[in-house]
Image: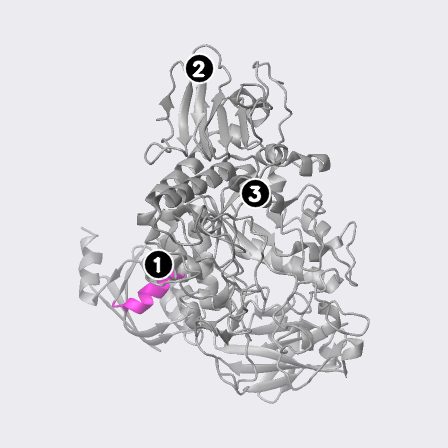
């Protein structure tokens, strides 16, 4: 059967046209042609501009006939377009009146907000043609990838071990020894490594199309070019970063990324995307016209009564997330990545902004967040909020969740860091953090999985630097070391930066192991920063957003140098995965509700059962009763963890186990490798031991079986 | 793009010359698909193919799917390293066996028979 609508009804010059369909927005390949549809409430006219790939001059400009417009949507089918070889844009005419929030300029060529692929930065770092008037160029995509039966993995949240990774930084360093460094393909080549480490979820720093040349400049200190390396500045929300694909120069980034996701899924590894819906790359009043500003500025951005851009993002503008049009775009975007790319979850950058109304005021029940929480297509997706913004809204522990949203637990990070370096007065707080922060989440009816636990992330020191520097060293960023946070809660262990002092280096290694132990064995969902498992350094830079060089790139040589840390981390992850009692999705009740004779969690000190019996408050010990694993539905071993962040050795009396059950030592960070950690099932039995000695700033983990 | 088809000893050689892209893909698909019938033996000789675009890869995937469905046999020969690499990176790497030369492809397709 041939469809009636495969025939044109109009002609314009050499082009054959037909009224289009208003939905879906964007450009869609239809029989015989391409359907274009774009919203603008305030534009008076709109033109479609067609280019051959890479060419600066268009081969056609077609005004949308007025009779093709439906409501505020310009729509048209153009027949016989070579969908692989064209790039398209729009020109919009309308009032230019910034005080009213209207910025129309009919000379600008605007990118489709719904572009599924974007050209113009096809190869990372390749100097663009700055004279080209159309820099970020919408392209068409054929959505027929062969998934071979794949779908999102739906791993239970409590079983996740997240690994936060920068696509380029992960393999760009020559030591990675991959064929196409810094690309999606290269991550695929490293899947065996990720499996060996044992993580089961990667969280990618932004992979939506962005412009690495945004705010690009030369560092006055190093003379190197500084770029937008992290990518927290969206050009397009529906398109993958072309320069992250080895096949980007052939326009095949979509298939390359899908192939990576398919293979990760085959290996049991989920993919979470870091999404940036708080602002765009168009910046403030002085920024470029890329798309939204010229299409409908007033719809897409939050504006002050005088027409200026609100800057809750700290990046010049703020996306108008709770405008119904923008809300639908965000929802459409997340649905697209979930359905088309099989993405398993999203981490929302500066998510507090998503709960602000169109004037910037925080709302009680933000419609966008509620919509995402209940959306059917996102129904099994992980939703994770960075629950603060640059406008001072801090919602860790109070982010509107509807039982669906998890949070980056910033308090976990801050408290763990302070406790790690030996700050006193945190014992009670630490008891909360180790249990999945019930004081923050239980009252909301949320379980442990609301808490994404982390000590380090892309933003701030790496774990190695956290134990090697008291202060940030961001001189290479070219801002006189003013940028980056000062509240690092770090401790250099006695010397700032690299040292030959063996004592200090041993202590640093121990501190890394201590941090990893507390992170991985806490209830909640652990997130590791890529590279921390091998002691990767950024040389004290705690804000490497602009450093596309060895400061940011993961140095794979460290896998040899710091094999001991890798081994420790790997075994700690394996231990978490082995023991369901470490992965409860509900908070502990501090009582025995299965009749095992032990509470689900019990606290201890120098004397068993007496958490207060310690000479200082840098000692915490707890025991998990295996009979209470998964709410008493699963039988697991008992686990005991003694944390001594004091600078002296202390004895901890062990709680007695039932007859026939013995304590076995799994980890002791106070011991040198290989006695620092034991393989699962090979833990060393302790015979007739009533008390264990925990060395200065050390942690001991026992398993009772 | 040009396609030459010849059959000898029950093996059909499909020699493609030029670019396999969105312009030429429909033509290639139209010519190749009908040749895939139960027990057919095809060699897609691609030593003169300079580029395979996304649309071109999709034609190859369609050929692979139909080959499996019809219980036929299709192999490739002469693909350049670069194109093989692109196929691997975009998830089209496991569709067919590729042989360096047409002669090698013929040898193997017949050897598998015996």
Q: Which mark is residue B93?
A: 1
**Chain for numbered disc 3:** A
Q: Which mark is residue A418?
A: 3
Q: How many marks?
A: 3
Label 2 to label 1, Cα distance in Å? 53 Å
Q: Nearer the viewer, residue A181 or A1?
A: A181
As helix, strand or loop, the secondary structure at mark 3 comes to helix
Residue A361 as seen in the image, left or right of residue B49: right
> On screen, A655 above or below A24?
above
Label 3 to label 1, Cα distance in Å? 50 Å
Q: Residues in magenta?
A: B78-95
Give the x, y percent position of residue A225: 46, 73
* Residue situated furthest top in the rendering: A659
**Chain for numbered disc 2:** A
Residue occupied by mark 2: A661
**Chain for numbered disc 1:** B
Q: Nearer the viewer, residue B73 or A628?
A: A628
């Amino acid at each position: 059967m041939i469809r009636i609508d495969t025939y044109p009804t109009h002609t314009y010059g050499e082009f054959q046209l037909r009224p289009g369909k208003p939905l879906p927005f964007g450009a869609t390949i239809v029989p015989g042609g391409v359907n274009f549809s774009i919203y603008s409430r305030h534009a008076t006219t709109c033109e479609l501009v067609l280019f051959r790939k890479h060419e600066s001059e268009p081969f056609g400009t077609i005004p949308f006939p007025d009779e093709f417009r439906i409501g505020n949507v310009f729509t048209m089918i153009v027949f016989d377009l070579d969908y692989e070889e064209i790039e398209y844009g729009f020109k919009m005419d309308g009032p230019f009146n910034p005080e009213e929030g209207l910025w129309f300029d009919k000379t600008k060529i605007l990118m489709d907000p719904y572009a599924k692929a974007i050209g113009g930065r096809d190869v990372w770092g390749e100097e663009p043609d700055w004279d080209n008037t159309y820099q970020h160029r919408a392209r068409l995509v054929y959505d027929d990838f062969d998934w071979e039966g794949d779908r999102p993995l739906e791993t239970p949240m409590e079983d996740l071990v997240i690994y936060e990774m920068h696509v380029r930084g992960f393999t760009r360093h020559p030591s990675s020894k991959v064929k196409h460094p810094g690309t999606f393909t290269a991550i695929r080549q490293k899947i065996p490594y990720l499996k060996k480490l044992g993580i089961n979820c990667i969280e990618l720093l932004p992979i939506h199309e962005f412009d690495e040349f945004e705010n690009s400049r030369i560092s006055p200190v190093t003379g190197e070019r500084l770029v937008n390396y992290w990518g927290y500045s969206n050009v397009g929300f529906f398109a993958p970063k072309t320069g992250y694909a080895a096949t980007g120069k052939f326009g095949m980034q979509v298939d390359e990324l899908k192939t990576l996701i398919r293979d990760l899924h085959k290996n049991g590894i989920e993919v979470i995307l870091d999404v940036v819906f708080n602002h765009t790359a168009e910046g403030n009043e002085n920024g470029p016209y890329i798309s939204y500003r010229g299409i409908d500025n007033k719809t897409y951005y939050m504006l002050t009564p005088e027409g200026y851009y609100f800057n809750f993002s700290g990046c010049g503008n703020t996306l108008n997330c709770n405008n119904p049009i923008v809300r639908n775009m965000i929802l459409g975007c997340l649905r697209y990545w979930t359905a088309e790319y099989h993405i398993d979850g999203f981490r929302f950058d500066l998510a507090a902004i998503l709960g602000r109304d169109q004037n910037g005021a925080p709302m009680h029940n933000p419609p966008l967040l509620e919509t995402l929480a209940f959306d059917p297509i996102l129904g099994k997706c992980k939703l994770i909020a960075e629950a603060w913004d640059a406008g001072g809204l801090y919602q860790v522990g109070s982010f509107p969740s509807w039982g669906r949203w998890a949070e980056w637990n910033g308090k976990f990070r801050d408290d763990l860091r302070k406790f790690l370096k030996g700050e006193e007065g945190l014992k009670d707080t630490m008891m909360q953090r180790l249990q999945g922060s019930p004081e923050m989440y239980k009252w909301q009816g949320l379980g442990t999985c609301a808490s994404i636990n982390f000590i380090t992330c892309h933003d701030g020191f790496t774990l190695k630097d956290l134990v090697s520097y008291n202060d940030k060293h961001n001189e290479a960023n070219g801002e006189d070391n003013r940028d980056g946070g000062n509240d690092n809660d770090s401790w250099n262990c006695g010397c700032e930066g690299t040292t030959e002092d063996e004592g200090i280096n041993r202590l640093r290694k121990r501190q890394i192991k201590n941090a990893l132990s507390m992170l991985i064995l806490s209830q909640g969902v652990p997130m590791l920063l890529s590279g921390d498992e091998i002691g990767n350094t950024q040389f004290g830079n705690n804000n490497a957003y602009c450093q596309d060089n060895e400061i940011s790139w993961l140095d794979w040589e460290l896998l040899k140098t710091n094999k001991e840390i890798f081994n420790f981390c790997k075994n700690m992850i394996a231990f978490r995965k082995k023991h369901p009692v470490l992965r409860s999705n509900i908070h502990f009740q501090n009582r025995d509700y299965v009749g095992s004779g032990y509470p689900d969690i019990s606290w201890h000190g120098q004397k068993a059962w007496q958490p207060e019996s310690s000479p200082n408050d840098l000692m915490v010990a707890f025991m998990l009763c295996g009979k209470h694993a998964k709410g008493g539905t699963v039988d697991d071993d008992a686990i005991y963890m003694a944390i001594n962040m004091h600078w002296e050795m202390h004895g901890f009396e062990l709680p007695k186990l039932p007859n026939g059950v013995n304590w076995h030592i799994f980890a002791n960070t106070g011991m040198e490798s290989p006695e620092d950690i034991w393989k699962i099932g090979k833990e060393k039995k302790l015979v007739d031991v009533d008390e264990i000695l925990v060395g200065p700033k050390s942690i001991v983990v026992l398993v009772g079986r | 793009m040009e396609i030459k088809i010849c059959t000898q000893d029950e093996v059909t050689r499909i020699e493609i010359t030029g670019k396999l892209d969105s312009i030429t893909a429909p033509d290639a698909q139209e010519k190749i698909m009908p040749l895939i019938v139960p027990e057919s033996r095809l060699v897609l000789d691609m030593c003169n193919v300079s580029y395979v675009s996304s649309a071109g890869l999709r034609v190859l995937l369609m050929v692979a799917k139909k080959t499996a469905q019809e219980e036929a046999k299709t192999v490739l020969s002469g693909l350049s390293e670069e194109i093989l690499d692109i196929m691997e990176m975009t998830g089209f790497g496991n569709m067919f066996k590729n042989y360096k030369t047409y002669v090698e492809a013929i040898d193997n397709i017949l050897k598998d028979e015996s």
